[in-house]
Image (cartoon, rainbow, N blue to C red):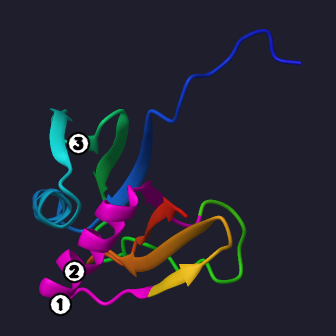
Amino acid sequence: MATFGVDRIDHVEVFVQDIDAAARWYADVLGLAEVARWDPEPVMIGAGETCLALFRAAPGEPARADRSNTRGWHRVAWAASPRGFEEAQRHLSSRGIKFRGPIDHGIAWSIYFADPDHNLLEITCPK
């Protein structure tokens, strides 16, 4: 048993080809604002208490490797209210971002999509 407790996820590291372009995309699509910036990286972007740390992928390497045959972190899921969930679908569609869903998980609904670097994302809301 741990002798300490954690409060929340502070941030998730995300590798992208162009940090500034990725920060603009996440601001436009998910409304994430820049929280902090190190020189040269990462750039921290977030909503509420949840942040992504944008790091530059190695030159010539895809930002997200094919992980279809491996285990580990897979996607970042963002929570939304039922109204926000509906608005998210309209917003993604208006920007030409294809998504899968909504998928009924019994206790929640989810939609699935990817950023321009193919990092997997989800927006979910309770039923």
The residue carrying pointer 3 sits among few (fewer than 14), some (14 to 19) or many (20 or more) residues within 10 Å by Cα, namely few
Q: Quadrant of the C terminus?
A: bottom right
Which label belongs to residue 96? Answer: 1
Residue 1 % position (x, y): 89, 18
Q: Which residue is mark 2?
A: 90
Residue 7 % position (x, y): 56, 23
Report the Cα–Cα distance between label 3 and label 1.
29 Å
Q: Nearer the viewer, residue 96 or 21?
A: 96
Circle 1 — which element?
Answer: loop
Q: Quadrant of residue 21?
A: bottom left
The residue carrying pointer 1 sits among few (fewer than 14), some (14 to 19) or many (20 or more) residues within 10 Å by Cα, namely few
N-term-proximal mark, 2 vs 1: 2
**In this picture, is 54 found above or below 106?**
above
Report the Cα–Cα distance between label 2 and label 1.
10 Å
What are the residue bounds of the magenta stretch?
Answer: 74-100
Magenta stretch holds residue 92: yes
> Is residue 72 rendered to the left or right of residue 117?
right
Callout 3, which amino acid? Glu
Mark nearer the viewer, 3 or 1? 1
Callout 2, which amino acid? Arg
Residue 60 % position (x, y): 30, 77
Q: Quadrant of residue 85?
A: bottom left
